[in-house]
Structures are given as C-alpha cells and as structure tokens.
Image: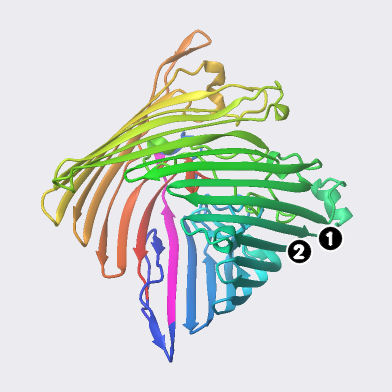
C-alpha cells in the first residue's frame, strides 16, 4: 500500500479504486480522497458579493475507502475526516467536523440472492421517492445504516427490500426508512426478443416518533404523522431504437421544508415521461415532468438541504463551460411544470472516418404551478435554447461553437416579484490543435451578454445586467503534463438610478496551474480567484462562496 504525505498551502486530492492487492485468495482495493484549500486575503475581492475568508485559513475534506472481495463475499469501510470542512459545505454550522467511521458493510451475493448489512447505497427507479447516495462534490451523503436483501428469478423478476436509519451529515437520524422495489420483465415472460418491456413499482415508508416538545420548538406542524408513505409505478419500453419511460409518484403529507414554511403540510406527486428515438448517427429525446411538494425529508427534525431522501435533478442541459453555468437551473420542489428536448446528429466522412460533424440542439423550459404563486399565474422559472456544432477538420484541428440563450427567475418564480426574469446570451468558441501525438493546445473564448435589467430589479441577483468575458488556454504534453491559465471578468454596463449614472468596477477571476500524470497518479497545482456561484453535479447544485486560494489535486489508486 502506498503511503502518501501531503503538506502544502492548499490541496484538492482524489484517489479512485484501480489496481488491486492480492490478500490470500481475495483482493483488496481502496480509494483515498482529500479536498483541501488554503484561503488567502485578497484586497480586490473585499467588495465582491459573497467573498469570504474563514478564520481558519485551511480547510480539508478527507475520505479513505477500503474494499475486500473474496468470491461471493465482500466487505468494506469508509473513513472521513474534516479538518475543518471547506467553505460551501457548512450550510449548517459544524455539520461536518472531526473524524468518523462513515460507512461499513458486509455483503454476500450469488446469481439470484444477495444480502447486505451495513450502510446502503441504492435507488428505486429514477430516485423520485428513494435514493441513498454519496456525492462528495456536493458534500452530500444520505446512506442508510441497516440491511438490504435482493432476489432475482432469472431475467423475469427482480425484487429488493431494505430497512435502516438514514445518515444526516455526520450522524444518523432517529427515523427509520423501509422500502421495497419490484421489477417484472414482460418481454422475457412472453419471449419478446427484440424488445425490452418492464413494469416496476416501489414503496417507501418513513417512520419517526413524534416529539411534541421538539415539534413545537422547531415549528413542525401538529398535522405531521409518524408514518409517511410513498408509492411509485413505472413503465419502460425499448424497441427498435424507440425508448419510452413513464413514472407516477404519490406521496403522503409531509412538512413543507423546501419553502421554509414549517408548520404546513401537503401531499406530493410527480408525473415523469420520456420518449426517444435513435438510428445510426441521429438521436432525439424528449422529457416532461410535473411535480408538486416533493422535497422529501429523511427526518422531520433535521435541517438543511442534506435532509432529503429522494433525488430530483434538473432535467436541463448540463454544461461544462464557465459562463453557461453562472446561473444554472435548480429544481423548484414545491411545484414545477416543464421539460426538455435534445437532438443530436453525427455526420462522418466515409473516406476519412476521423473527419466528422457533430450537431446538437437543446431546448428546456420550466414554469411554476399557478396555485403556488401570489399572482395565480404559471411564472417562468427557466428557459434555455442552445445549439452547438463540433467539427473535426483533420487529424490536427477540432473546433466547437456553442450558442445559448438562458432566461431565469431570480426569485425562483415566487415572492413580491412574480414573473420577473433575467436573460443571458452566451457564445463559446473552443479550438484544439494537435502539433503531433504528444503536443496539443486548446483554447476557449466565451462571452455573455445580459439583457438590460431595470435598476429596481438589480438587487434581486448578483451581477444582474452584467456582461462577462472568459477565456482558457491549455497546453498538453501527453501523457504526463498539462499547463493551463484562465480568467473571467465582468463588465457592468452603465445604468441610471435616481437620475445618476451608476457603473460598478470590473473584477477579474484569474486562475492558473499545471498537472502531472504518471501511471495511476495525477497531481494538479493551481492558484486563483473563485467567483461566488454554484457547484453542480448530476443536475443538483450547492452554493459556493467567493474566495481566493491555493489548491492541489492529487489522485492515485491501489
């Protein structure tokens, strides 16, 4: 096993399981991750919204995971240490602190039957009523400490049931989750060889004893009952390039945690439908979702966004460029209606397969449910119209062009400013040139033009009415070295307020560094400013304060 010693001003490090160590007749594998940052003072950031320098300049989130496999038997543990937690993970003071044996499990699995005792990570269907998972980028982990059993009858029937208490931050809550999931393959039962056709259903129950004194202190409604029941029914079809998915969810009365309206309860439901088609280089996928009151608490006495037992991601395009993610869409769990359509086409050169065109277009839009707004209208939450074209011209040159127009509600569609939306128009150019198999240069240039925002609305969102410019240069020496430098800056256009011209100063957010890779080890060192914004993963986001600091990324495996 490798011994890794890390001592630097700031660090971000991740190790993923890769090589395995023989231990008797079994195999031992592991992963280690440490995310650390050293925060520094920055005089030019003191007037920037959301800028923060913690009292303890050093933050560190650490994870060590070990897994052992021997035939049908497996076991594992995960240790976590926060010394202290990084900025952006401390929504609840001291939610993450010190050391913890975060998860452990023992599992036996054969072809048909399996049982796991310990911390459970699993999902029913699309996760709309249950998903226990870990996402370290979000600081989220809601695993269940308990037992899970699975049984498969050939390819015809799959069943699983589980029971346990959920994790909230570094502790386990005094509530109990039990559930069952059943999937029946009608295609296999009736011998339909060219199709996949399944019927599925799930049931989840949350039980928590009602403490009248605690309920009164935390503002929990006296209408909340010990048992919360949720049901899901699903239909899945794949046939000759056609895919169809449908799910309906119903949820009993639960506290309206998501809008901060403690003391009120409501039932919830979801309608989710997807329809797609693909043939050769063409594919199209459309999705529709209507949901209401679906921020499902794992504990009625828990706090924060970590107190969720289900998974409701944003069904919109997930971007990787800086400016396209300045104001990402986040689901309104109290009520939303909308969907997206995604179209992709790839055109290959028959005589030179390395030459191609990739054409992509996407449209998504979401509205509030009118019964949940003050003006009794379906207010726009989000709209994104985007197209991008990627061209591989030859073995050396590849280019990509992206255009996007995003409209978004700064109040998430409710409050005193019902119906107010801002808009951003974004263009991105991306060029990669390979000098030879070892050396390559990639450059990005991005520009965001904001529609005019009336002065009385500018305080609703940071940088409202601001234009942005961003660029990235990346030089690679394969397979070991990569050097990069980026910057993003805002341009606040002049506007009139109280008869006077107002212009805010321009702020730069530069960042630079390098990475080195050898075998299964990768080191990345960087320094720069970070704008207040969102860190997103899989359509779920957390807010990240602005800061300036040094970071190191080290990845390895054993």
Q: Which percent across, then down, holds residue 160?
A: 65, 67
Q: Is residue 167 visible?
A: no
Residue linked to disc 2: 174
Quadrant showing the C terminus: bottom left
* Magenta-colored span: 28-44
Q: Nearer the viewer, residue 550 or 203?
A: 203
Which element is circle 2 on? loop
- The local crowd at label 2, few if under 14, some if 14 to 19, many if 20 or more residues have their Cα within 10 Å, is some
Q: Nearer the viewer, residue 241 or 531?
A: 241
- The local crowd at label 1, few if under 14, some if 14 to 19, many if 20 or more residues have their Cα within 10 Å, is few
Q: Which percent across, then down, holds residue 509?
A: 36, 39
Which element is circle 1 on? loop
Residue 152 falls in image quadrant: bottom right
Is mark 1 in CB contact (under 8 Å) with mark 2?
A: yes
Q: Is residue 264 visible?
A: yes
Q: Which percent across, then down, holds residue 41?
A: 42, 46
- Residue 72 sits above or below residue 431 on the image: below
Q: Is residue 36 magenta?
A: yes
Total tally of numbered discs in the picture: 2
Quadrant showing the N terminus: bottom left
Render colour scheme = rainbow
Q: Residue furthest top?
A: 499
Q: Residue furthest bottom?
A: 24
């Amino acid at each position: 096993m490798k011994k890794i010693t890390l001592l630097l001003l700031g660090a971000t490090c991740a190790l993923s399981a890769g090589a395995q160590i023989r231990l008797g007749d079994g195999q031992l594998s592991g992963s280690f991750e440490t995310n650390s940052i050293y925060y520094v003072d920055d005089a030019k950031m003191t007037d920037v919204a959301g800028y923060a320098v913690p009292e303890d300049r050093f933050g560190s989130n650490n994870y060590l995971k070990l897994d052992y496999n021997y035939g049908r038997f497996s076991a594992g543990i995960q240790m976590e240490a926060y010394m202290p937690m990084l900025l952006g993970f401390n929504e609840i003071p001291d939610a993450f602190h010190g050391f913890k044996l975060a998860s452990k499990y023992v599992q036996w699995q054969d072809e048909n039957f399996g049982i796991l005792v310990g911390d459970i990570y699993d999902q029913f269907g699309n996760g709309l009523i249950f998903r226990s998972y870990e996402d370290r980028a979000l600081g989220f982990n809601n695993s269940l400490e308990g037992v899970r059993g699975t049984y498969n009858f050939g390819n015809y029937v799959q069943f699983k049931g589980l029971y346990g208490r959920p994790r909230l931050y570094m502790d386990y809550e005094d509530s109990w989750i039990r559930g069952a999931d059943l999937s029946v393959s009608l295609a296999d039962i009736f011998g339909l060889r060219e199709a996949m056709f399944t019927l599925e259903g799930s049931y989840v129950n949350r039980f928590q004893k009602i403490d009248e004194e605690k309920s009164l202190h935390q503002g929990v409604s006296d209408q909340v009952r010990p048992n919360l029941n949720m049901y899901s029914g699903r239909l899945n079809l794949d046939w000759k390039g056609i895919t169809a998915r449908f799910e309906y969810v119903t949820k009993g009365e639960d506290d309206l945690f998501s809008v901060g309206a403690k003391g009120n309860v409501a039932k919830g439901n979801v309608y989710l439908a997807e329809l797609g088609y693909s043939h050769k280089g063409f594919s199209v996928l459309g999705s529709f979702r209507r949901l209401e009151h679906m921020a499902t608490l794992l504990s009625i006495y828990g706090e924060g966004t970590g107190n969720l037992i289900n998974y409701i991601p944003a069904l919109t395009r997930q971007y990787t460029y800086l400016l396209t993610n300045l104001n990402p869409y986040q689901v309104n769990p109290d009520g939303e209606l909308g969907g997206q359509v995604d179209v992709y086409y790839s055109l290959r050169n028959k005589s030179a397969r390395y030459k191609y065109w990739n054409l992509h277009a996407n449209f998504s839009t979401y509205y509030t449910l009118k019964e949940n707004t003050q003006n009794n209208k379906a207010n726009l939450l989000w709209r994104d119209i985007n197209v991008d074209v990627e061209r591989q011209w030859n073995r050396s040159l590849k280019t990509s062009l992206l255009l996007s127009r995003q409209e978004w509600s700064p109040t998430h569609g409710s409050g005193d400013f019902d119906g107010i939306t801002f808009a951003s128009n974004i263009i991105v150019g991306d060029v990669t040139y390979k000098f030879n198999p070892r050396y390559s240069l990639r450059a990005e240039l991005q520009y965001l033009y904001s529609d005019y925002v009336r002065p009385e609305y500018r305080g609703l969102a940071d940088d409202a009415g601001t234009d942005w410019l961003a660029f990235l240069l990346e030089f690679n020496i394969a397979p070991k070295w990569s050097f990069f430098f980026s910057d993003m800056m805002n341009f606040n256009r002049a506007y009139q307020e109280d008869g006077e011209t107002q212009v805010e100063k321009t702020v730069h957010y530069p960042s630079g560094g390098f990475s080195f890779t050898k075998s299964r080890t990768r080191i990345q060192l960087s320094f720069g400013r970070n704008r207040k914004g969102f860190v997103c993963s899989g359509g779920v986001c957390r807010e990240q304060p602005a800061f300036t600091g040094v970071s190191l990324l080290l990845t390895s495996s054993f």
